[in-house]
Amino acid sequence: MAKAVSRKAKQEGRRWQREAKALVALALAGFSIFALASFDPRLPLDEQESPVGPVGVWLGWAIFWAFGYAGFLFPLILILYGAGAFIRLRVATGYLALVGLGLLLVSATGLLARSSTPFAELRVPSGGMMGWGVVELLRASMGEVGPLLVLLTSIPVGFLFLTQVSYSALSRRATARLTRLFGRRRARTAVESAQPELFPAPA
């Protein structure tokens, strides 16, 4: 009995600690969203204004310089982490989450750098300096087509590390739901066609 009580007390202690961390993560996510959404990479740094103050301006500048628009992945991950403490979400933690985030950053920054022009003020691609480095490294080793294949493949692999959800299981669930949906429609159509007309057309 005493062991059960102590175990429950430990679980409660871990729960409030996890929820406290989640609230901090959600607050950081909101701060980052305001900083990124209000930052205009076309303007000089001294002309920037942010609803979260000078810290938000510098944060927006640093994230855009390093990762470009792919920097919006950071508040998204923070939101998923924070929400996971209150609702059941399959989000990895520890090194698996870092690997997944790293793969998503590499793929997102690289694809943005390949398909966009540099920012006027920052002098870097919209995928940031990370995107520029990824594209140049892959081009030097794999030519023009190889980097695109690597970057596109990294996206679903990164989501696998982050969510740990099997794509085959998702496809089976989707197939089963579609089968049930179409089965119900066919059964309804068969029943409606088998019913006699209440008001037959005059001869």
Image (cartoon, helix red, strand yellow):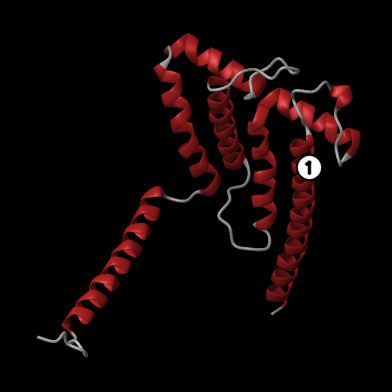
The residue positioned 46% from the left and 11% from the top of the image is 141
Amino acid on which the number 1 mark rests in the picture: Phe
Above or below, 19 against 27 in this view is below
Number of labels in the image equals 1
Q: Nearer the viewer, residue 136 or 50?
A: 50
Is 110 in front, or is 8? 110
Residue sitting farthest toward the bottom: 198
Residue 77 placed where, x, y %?
Answer: 65, 45
Q: Residue furthest top?
A: 140
From the image, tell me which residue sits under label 1. Answer: 34
Query: In this rendering, would 36 be left or right of 163?
Result: right
| Residue 21 appears left or right of 196 | right
Residue at 21% across, 81% down: 191
What's the residue at 58%, 48% (across, down)?
A: 92
Residue 93 percent location from the top left of the image:
62, 47
Neighbor class of circle 1 (other Cα within 10 Å; few <14, some 14-19, many 20+) is: some
Relative to residue 17, is residue 67 depicted above or below? above
Residue 58 position within the rendered picture, expressed as x and y whole percent measured from the top left? 84, 29
Q: Secondary structure at mark 1?
A: helix
- Name the residue: 28% across, 66% down: 182
Residue pushed farthest front? 203
The percent position of residue 52, horizontal first and vertical second, equals 87, 41
Quadrant where the C terminus sits is bottom left
Looking at the rendering, in which quadrant would you find the N terminus?
bottom right
